Image: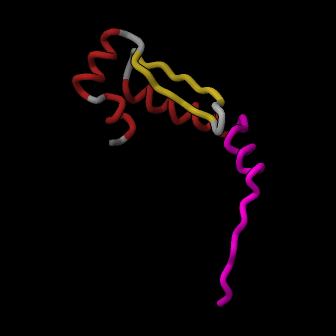
Amino acid sequence: MADVKVVLNSAGVRELLKCAEIEATCREVAQDVASRAGSGYEVDTYVGKTRVNAMVSATTREARKDNLENNTLLRALGG
């Protein structure tokens, strides 16, 4: 069998990592994590220098305390 060499189009991959569809997918996954974590967690997505980023953060005092004591966000991720 012949060896197969795959060459990625760097500009295309860069464009794909920043596209609106990927941002929507990241937001959907982050919202799922936030809903499993409970109330007091907020989702934020933004396009960074190289890719789309999604973040779930504890926004209330109770949520921050819960996350510190129980690793709520880590558990919501499945870890």
Residue 1, picture quadrant: bottom right
Residue 16 included in the magenta stretch of the image: yes
Residue depicted at x 26% and y 22%: 68
Residue depicted at x 72% and y 65%: 7
Q: Nearer the viewer, residue 35 or 57?
A: 57
Please tell me whether residue 43 is drawn above or below residue 60 in the rendered image. below
Please tell me whether residue 59 is drawn above or below residue 47 in the rendered image. above
- In the image, farthest residue toward the bottom: 1
Magenta segment, which residues?
1-21
Q: Nearer the viewer, residue 19 or 34?
A: 19
Image side of residue 30 versus residue 11, left or right: left
Residue depicted at x 51% and y 23%: 43
Tell me how the rendering is colored: secondary structure
Position of residue 15 measured from the top left corner of the image (x, y, whole percent): 75, 43
Q: Quadrant of the C terminus?
A: top left
Image side of residue 60 versus residue 26, left or right: left
Give the total number of marks visible in the rendering: 0
Position of residue 66 measured from the top left corner of the image (x, y, whole percent): 27, 19
Position of residue 59 measured from the top left corner of the image (x, y, whole percent): 42, 13
Residue 18 included in the magenta stretch of the image: yes
